[in-house]
Image (tube, rainbow, N blue to C red):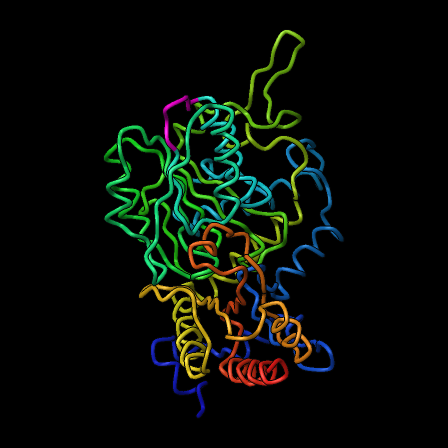
Amino acid sequence: MNHETTHVASVDAGIDWARIRADFPLLTRQVNGKPLIYLDSANTGQKPASVIQSVDDFYRRHNANVSRAVHTLGTEATEAYEGARRKLARFLNVRADELVLCSGTTFAINLVAYSWALPKLKAGDVILVSRMEHHANIVPWQLVAQRTGASIRVAEILPDGTLDLDALHAALTGEVKLLAIAHTSNVLGTVNPVREICREARRRGIVTVVDGSQAVPHRPVDIAAIGCDFYAFTGHKMCGPTGTGALWARREHLQAMPPFIGGGEMIKEVSFDGTVFNDPPHKFEAGTPNIAGFIGLGAAVDYLDGVGMANIEAREAELLAHATEELDRIDGLRIFGRAPDKAAVVSFLVEGAHAHDLATLLDLEGVAVRSGQHCAHPLLQFYGVAATLRASFAFYNTHEEIERFVAALKKARGLLA
């Protein structure tokens, strides 16, 4: 069956997905003598040539520090860096002065934990987190709870991988001061109704932190419409360089929060008697940033905008439907996460085969999938498993790759039988 033609009804018919795939140099390489099939985009996304070239061009032609020099190179570097901030702001429908540029979601959530939560929380307060959270949206809250006397409460999920929304709403009680929730699960692919959840939390005076790492690369995201207090995301999952990302926060929070890290650039004036801090978001951006990385992230935004996030979402939905259909035909294969609204992530196990063994054998066939606990130990404990395989798709994957992946999986299973 020619899936390249039969699965495209909901995608812009003018898009040449083969041409788009050709924009990604790494996808042309071979692994273990086989053409690479990269199915680990939930871990990190591949980079189009335009992103790679933008980083190279900065270092070759414009390299200088930002916001510190009036010479030509310094001005060029600063404009390109702040230009990337403005691109991200437009991409997510927020103000540029509400975006703190940082190394990624982990740093962003820790910034909220130490600059907002630590000064505010006290014994008796509750931090509510969902069962499906990545460790980056669990561990910082545990550290804050240990230091403040606050406690952690868990919002549970249903067997199909969706949030138990009735239980979640019931858990939004007076002692809950903070709700930390993933927009999209990195293991289950579940897309949570964050707009509804944040609305209910806000009605009760509860501050919300949304982990958008797995949402921003794969669907249109309008942070203003979501109505959260904080939104964190990572650049390397959205075709940008590693070590990039941002925290969006409501202006009133940014103005009230103390700095997380002190140093250069985040100040207006320093004396030995005290320091006057810079205005947000620069108050939280101490030191020399990953300038080239953020210029690359700006190029990634340009690239994603060019393809169209709605087109990307539709393309990946087709790939997910195809992969799920093929995997469901394999006896003894169990998929974790069957949410009706789901990103292109399939976590699964095959009866009688260890996840790591299968991943190793798949790699010999050129297929890159992730095996393990995916930085989500509490979630896998819910399902009573020690590890899963995870195949995560992006718009640059193909239906032919899915069929080759399934064939390689069957071959690997046969070797382990």
Q: Quadrant of residue 273?
A: top right
On the question of residue 8 being in view, the answer is: yes
In the image as oriented, which residue stretches furthest toward the top? 273
In the image as oriented, which residue stretches furthest toward the right? 60
Q: In x, y percent, where is residue 205?
A: 28, 31
Look at the image and tell me in which quarter the N terminus lies.
Answer: bottom left
For this view, does 70 lie left or right of residue 371?
Answer: right
Q: In x, y percent, where is residue 280?
A: 49, 29
Residue shown at 58%/64% (left/top)?
371
Q: Main secondary structure of the magenta part?
A: loop
In the image as oriented, which residue stretches furthest toward the bottom? 1
Question: In this view of the protein, which residue sits in the foreground, 240 or 307?
Answer: 240
Question: In this view of the protein, which residue sits in the foreground, 394 or 405?
Answer: 405
Q: In x, y percent, where is residue 183?
A: 40, 51
Vertical relation: 258 (above or below) 348: above
Q: Is residue 36 magenta?
A: no
Residue shown at 44%/72% (left/top)?
334
Look at the image and tell me in which quarter the C terminus lies.
Answer: bottom right
For this view, does 286 lie left or right of residue 164?
Answer: right
Q: Quadrant of residue 172?
A: top left
On the question of residue 94 being in view, the answer is: no
The magenta span reads 120-126
Vertical relation: 408 (above or below) 200: below
